[in-house]
Amino acid sequence: MAALGASDLLVPTFRKQHDAWEHFVAHTSTGVDKVAIPFEDGALPGWFFRASGGGATTLVLVNGSDGSLASLWGSAGAAALARGYNALVFDGPGQQSQLFEKNTCFRPDWENVLTPVYEYLAGLDGVDSERIAVYGISQGGYWVARAISFEHRFAAAITDPGLVDVSTSWTSHVPKSLLKLLDEGQLEKFDEEMGFGMKFSPDTARTWVFRARPYGTSGYAETIEAVRRYTVADVADQITTPLLILSPEHEQFWPGQADQLASLTPSVSTVMRFTAAEGADEHCQPLARTLTAQRMYDWLDEHLA
């Protein structure tokens, strides 16, 4: 498996869509400030949208593994602003600009990402530090669940969908015989067998490289071992934040994990189900984002009343 370096195709494509995002921000009638969130030795780029009349609640929107800011805004940000919430979108480690421009990688300890985000927001004029909530879409559901296991100052949290173990979306597609090699420590043999199999499925090979790139890994075994660190199974019982867990019927990436997360957080969590009969099934309810926004923001209104 080749090293996952910069792509001649992906980087210019990212820059084109990011330019489109910047043009949207420059021309929207909504009040928005481009911000730099202090983070370790540098800063994370963010865009803070202020609700007209001054929103009482601020919502942090956390992206998934490969979503764009425009997609995140369309999925949940615009509806938050319409509901009267301030909204912050940003790129974290391994996401979008941080991946394509700075070559940073994902990290499992997202409490060390969202804590600086919370503290930055809490210091802004017009932001009530006791009314900052957080939402995570797709793999962002992991980032949020992990962060609130340690960072307890968010007033409420939403995971869309509920997620406990990121690695199952990878390992469920790998034959058990190969996973046995990995678990036995036969890493070279695992890589050899995986590489042989990928020769017969170029599309799968390209998808693997694309999905592995943000983890900064270069081998099949190395990638699986890295992704297996992205779990909240051992820390979710520390969550004290009111938590809404979205659970769509026919979830194809992490089936059953919404209920698993709820079982780990029984005193603070609520499961909100979406069905095929409503046209709201599959991962992140792609055909029912208006219904999704209505229900989850109703819940948020109730919990922050």
Image: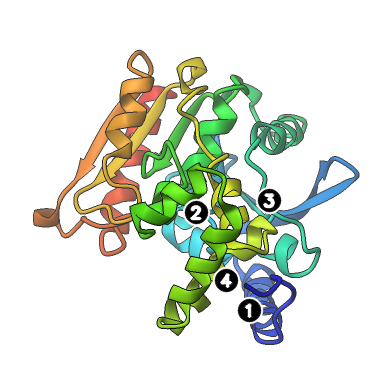
Marks 3 and 4: CB-CB under 8 Å? no
Q: Nearer the viewer, residue 252 or 39?
A: 252
Tell me the CA gap for discs 1 and 2.
17 Å
Q: In x, y percent, where is residue 253? A: 35, 54
Q: Nearer the viewer, residue 280 or 256?
A: 256
How crowded pointer 3 is (Cα within 10 Å; few <14, some 14-19, many 20+) is rated as many
Q: Are marks 1 and 4 in contact (CB under 8 Å)?
A: no
In whole angstroms, how far apart are the C-alphas of marks 4 and 2?
A: 30 Å
| Numbered disc 4: secondary structure | helix
Q: Quadrant of the N terminus?
A: bottom right
Query: What residue sits right under mark 1 in the picture?
Result: 20
Looking at the rendered structure, the kind of residue marked 1 is: Ala
Q: Is residue 297 left or right of residue 52?
A: left
Label 2 sits on residue: 77
- In the picture as drawn, the residue positioned furthest to the left comes out as 277
Mark yes or no: residue 277 visible: yes
Tell me the CA gap for discs 1 and 3: 20 Å
Q: Residue furthest right?
A: 41
Does 298 appear above or below 20? above
Q: Secondary structure at mark 3?
A: loop
4 or 2: mark nearer the eye:
4
Q: Nearer the viewer, residue 270 or 87?
A: 270
Disc 3 to disc 2: CB gap under 8 Å: no
Residue under label 4 = 209
The three-letter code of the residue at mark 4 reads Val
What residue appears at the point 33 percent right and 17 percent down from the top-left corner? 266
Among numbered discs 4 and 2, the one appearing first in the sequence: 2
In the picture of the structure, the residue carrying the numbered disc 3 is: 92
Q: Amino acid at mark 2?
A: Gly
